[in-house]
Amino acid sequence: MKAAVLVFPGSNREVDVAQAIELVTGRKPQMVWHGDGDFEKTDLIVVPGGFSYGDYLRCGAMAAQSPVMAEVKRRANQGVPVLAICNGFQIVTEAGLLPGTLMRNAHLKFVCRDVHLKVETSQSLFTNRYQADQVIRIPVAHAEGNYFASEDTLKQLEDRGQVAFRYCAPDGAVDAGGNPNGSIRNIAGVFNETKTVMGLMPHPENAVEPMFGGCDGRALFEGLVDALS
Amino acid sequence: MKARVHVTLKNGVLDPQGKAIGHSLNRLGFAEVGDVRQGKFIELELAETDATKARARLDEMCRKLLANTVIENYSIELVG
C-alpha cells in the first residue's frame, strides 16, 4: 500500500501517522506539502491532525482551500481512499468531502485523553479488521470535535450506514457519559456515501504500539493494508 | 468600496461560547443579560464600484470561505 500524508503549516501529527503507516507497511509514506497541486499516485491519502493555518477563521477552513486539497478532492471523487484524522476531519468537512462540521467542544475545554469508541460497521476499507459493535480505546486531543449536522443529514448518515464510530462508555453504552465533546448522537467518525473517505476525531495513529498505552488503532491501518495492497 | 460581513450561528445551533460570555456578564453584575450569541465581524476593502456586482461577489465569498453554511448565517453590508 502506497500512502501520501499531507502536511500543512501547523500540522503536528503527520509524523505520528507516517510512523503508524511505516509500522504496518514497512515503507515510509510520501509527505506532500500543502502548496503542491500534484503528487505521485498513491493508494491512500491521509489528512493528519494539528492546527493547520493556526485554526484561523474556522478549524480547517483555510487548509480546505489549499492547492493540495483541490487535487485531493479530484482524486477522492475518482475513488482514491482518504483517511482524515482530527484537524484532517475538520479540513475534509470544510472541503465538502464529508457531511456535517466540527464545532467547539460543548464544555469549551481542550480534551486530551483516551476515549472508548463503538465500531458501527466492519464493512469498509477502514474498519474491516474490527467487528461491528466492538469497543476500542484510542486517544482524542482536540478543542473542536463537537460533530454537528442538520437533522436531514443525520437521517441520511444513519440510513446509509455512514456513521463509522460513536463515542461510548467502556461497556459500549452510547450515552452522554461516554461523549467527550458534545457530538450529536455521539458521532466520532463518518464515511462519505461510497465509504472511500473516512474522517474521525480520535487518533488511531497514537494507539499502535503497546508501550504507548494500547494498540486498538493498529487494526485500522492493517485493515487498509489488507484492502489496498 | 468597503463591505462588512457578519457571520452568526444559525438558530438552534448551540453556542457554548455565547453562554459562557452571558454567565460572565451575569457574574459581573449585569443581571439584565439573558441569552448571548457570539459571531464574527469581517471588514473587507473591495476594488469593485458597482454595488450589485460587489454584493454577488461577497455572497460567493461567504459561501466559499467566510461562513460555514452548515451552522452559520451571514449578512452583507456595503459601506461608502
Image (tube, coloured by chain):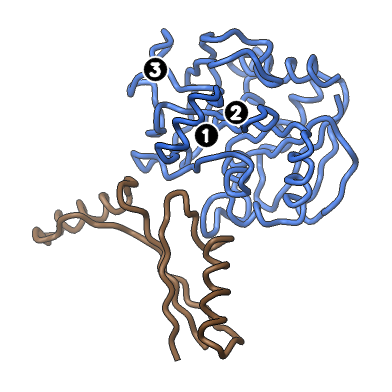
> Going from the N terminus, do you reach mark 3 or mark 2 first?
3
In the rendering, what colour is chain A? blue
Determine which residue is flagged by label 1: A141
User: Is residue A15 left or right of A178 when viewed as pictured?
Assistant: right
Is A37 left or right of A203, judged from the image as shown? right
| Colour that chain B carries in the picture | brown
Chain on which label 2 sits = A
Q: Which residue is mark 3?
A: A174
Whether residue A107 is visible, yes or no, is yes
Dot label at residue A203: 2
Q: Dot 1: what SS?
A: strand
Query: Measured along the vertical axis of the image, is residue A126 above or below residue A57?
Result: above
Using the image, tell me which numbered label, if any, was put on residue A15.
Answer: none
x and y percent of residue A50 in the render?
Answer: 61, 43
Tell me the mark number nearer the camera, choosing from 3 and 2: 3
Against A127, is B71 above or below? below
Tell me which amino acid carries mark 1: Ala
